[in-house]
Image (spheres, rainbow, N blue to C red):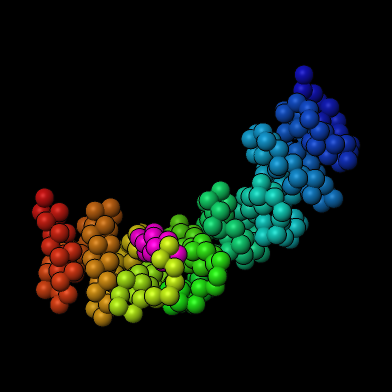
Amino acid sequence: MPNPSKIARLEAKRKVKRLVKVLGRRGPEEERREAAAALGRIGDLTSLDAVLEAARSPEHSIKRAVVQALAGFGRPAVERLSEEVHSGRHVDCRLAAAEALAAIGDDRAVLPLIGALAAWGVDTNSAPLLIEALAGFGERAAEPIATSLGPVDLARRMVDSLDRVATGATAAELAKPVQIRGRLVEALAQIGDPRAADAVARVWEDTTLAQERLSGPDRPHAAPSAITGEIRLLLDLEQRGSATRLGTFGAPGVDRLLEALDHESPALRRSALETLDWVRREAGPDERIPAAILAGLDDPDESVRTAAEALQEQSAG
């Protein structure tokens, strides 16, 4: 049977090494959870690495106890946890560190978390938790995230580089910077700071124009068709994601979409109309949106006019 009273005695006597031994051995889960909690309350940094290592336990309850214990170490642990979240060798330890940093809430963790997202953000297991951790810092993280989005033409540079693809290169390698930027945009959208709408609009514009370039007459011809096809699919996902996230910013997002209706690119104008219609359906009425869709019927480009007609029909139906 678990013996919490034993753990309480060890905690009262600050027997850190004994508690570390209990946490690390294959004993009753309840006893190990209590040991983790006790170590977090004691806050002796010499036990921090041992608590981190316990995040590799297969038992979910132990993982949760570890995160809570790590958060219990508080601000003195931020530097070590920041190092772990960016450079740790095991995914469970990195993610436990990220959750603990979010719970501690020290602004020093924002840049390491951004760096961790840049390093591990294409991992579908890591990305959601890292995004959530960053978003937990709210407006304090918005500016650093926006600053880290990279060149405004990142996706277009990727498309232009396809004619110079090295032998053995993969679409995933080429697209990683664009995908990482998409994860950062997701964090910005979760934060919802209206000042970030401009940064998200630039990402949406870049991915839309990159799509257009990849399908146009000046598209790269030397790249293997398999890589080009994968890049096209990845760009489509990123473009749709950035457009939708721009729409979640409310009035500031709508402002950027309306401005894009005057852009020289038909693809951007078409995407703007489609995203405005999504905003109208998901976020509620904005009197400017029906007027914008109606004006699209007179667009000089046939594809934009066709999109506007379809949106008008859906709205009427």
Q: Position of residue 78 (x, y in %)?
A: 71, 58
Residue 273 visible in the displayed image? yes
Name which residue lies at 19% across and 69% down.
304
Where, by quadrant of the figure, is residue 1 drawn? top right
> In the current view of this chain or complex, which residue is farthest to the top?
1
Name which residue lies at 18% across and 64% down.
307
Name which residue lies at 58% across and 60% down.
117
Q: Position of residue 230 (x, y in %)?
A: 42, 61
Residue 240 within the magenta-colored segment of the rendering? yes
Name which residue lies at 88% across and 36% down.
18
Residue 236 within the magenta-colored segment of the rendering? yes
Q: Is residue 299 left or right of residue 3?
A: left
Residue 143 visible in the displayed image? no
Question: Mostly what secondary structure, the magenta segment?
Answer: helix
Q: Position of residue 34 (x, y in %)?
A: 75, 33
Q: Is residue 189 left or right of residue 307?
A: right
Q: Is residue 12 left or right of residue 88?
A: right
Q: Name the residue nearer the viewer: 106 or 182.
A: 182
Q: Position of residue 40 (x, y in %)?
A: 75, 43
Q: How many marks?
A: 0
Q: Name the residue nearer the viewer: 107 or 168.
A: 168
Q: Which residues are magenta?
A: 227-242
